[in-house]
Image (cartoon, helix red, strand yellow):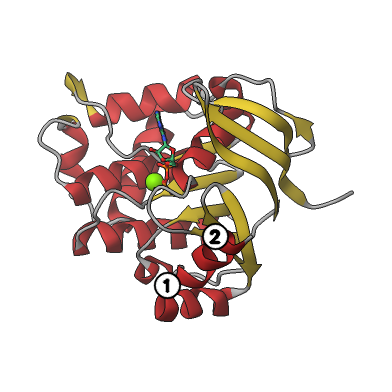
Amino acid sequence: MSNTILTCQKLCAAVGDKPILHDIDLSIGQGEVHVLLGPNGAGKSTLGHVLMGDPTYDMTGGSIEFDGQDITELPPNKRSLAGMFLSFQAPVEIPGVPLRSFLRAMVEAHGVQMKNKQFKQRVQELAQQLDMDPAYLDRELGVGFSGGEKKKVEMLQLLLLQPKLAILDETDSGLDVDALSVVSRGMELYRRDCGGTLLIITHNTRILERLAVDCAHVMVSGRLVDTGDAALIDLIDAQGFERYETQLEQA
Ligand code: ADP
Ligand code: MG
């Protein structure tokens, strides 16, 4: 039995007739922390969405195996039920629906068995761990939420659902200091209390400070061009992506 949670082989993807991802091979072990780095427009978010089955993108080749199952043909909701989670960059606003009710419905939709009292207790406890005022749970979903507050909702979802793999795309959201610390705390709790597996897409390597990173990948122009350990992150912080871009131009 292998302890690999995600494997993609020769994954290719396009939007309309524009190819974006080329022959992506990626393997993530259960409980590992992987980081995906790359310049803007490299295709990082696209990979996150393709892994999740977002119909905006056509998977034009390759395969995805998740938790021992070929999920290449599975729709997003089935992938989510199988234990995959993708952070959202702009959470929905639903006036009139309190955050607490939304979270309850989400947990139920995932078939997580929890009595009302137990749910209340758990949400309260998580809110505390995330430094969230419990009164906040009665606020209307997404309405007037700050960047940091949106991130708290996202981390609450993550910690309630306890997915097997969380793909967190933090690239474009311009995290402020508050949001940054929420994400980093959330990821720490997810690792510590759920033993979860992470694929983190980020520019801001400060959010990685509380995590032991197992593997870093570099994506340029829709290709994975390098893989290494945490030292690769420091190297890129210092040198950027230029040398990869030059290599690709010369290839
Ligand atoms: P990154 O997250 O690395 O910044 P993206 O995955 O967002 O990169 O984008 C990769 C490329 O794919 C870019 O050229 C982008 O314009 C294009 N792209 C991504 N999503 C779409 C879409 N829905 N429609 C058209 N082009 C897209
Ligand atoms: Mg992106």
Question: For the residues marked 2 and 1, what is the alpha-carbon distance in whole angstroms?
Answer: 16 Å
Check the picture and name the quadrant holding the C terminus: bottom right
* Quadrant hosting residue 189: bottom left
Badge number at residue 249: 2
The answer to whether residue 196 shows anywhere in this view is no
The answer to whether residue 222 shows anywhere in this view is yes
Number of disc labels: 2
Residue situated in front as seen by the camera: 136 or 114: 136
With 47 as the anchor, is 12 left or right in this view?
A: right
Residue situated in front as seen by the camera: 73 or 127: 73
Relative image position of residue 88 (x, y in whole percent) = 36, 37
Kind of residue indicated by mark 2: Glu
Q: Residues within 10 Å of mark 1 (few under 14, many from 20)?
A: some
Relative image position of residue 213 (x, y in whole percent) = 56, 69
Q: Residues within 10 Å of mark 2 (few under 14, many from 20)?
A: few
Residue situated in front as seen by the camera: 179 or 128: 179
Q: Secondary structure at mark 2?
A: helix
Q: Residue at x 52, y 67 (%)?
A: 246
Relative image position of residue 140 (x, y in whole percent) = 16, 28
Badge number at residue 33: none
Q: Secondary structure at mark 1?
A: loop
Q: Residue at x 35, y 57 (%)?
A: 183
Of callouts 2 and 1, the N-terminal one:
1
Q: Residue at x 41, y 74 (%)?
A: 209
**Pointer 1: what residue?**
240
* Quadrant hosting residue 135: top left
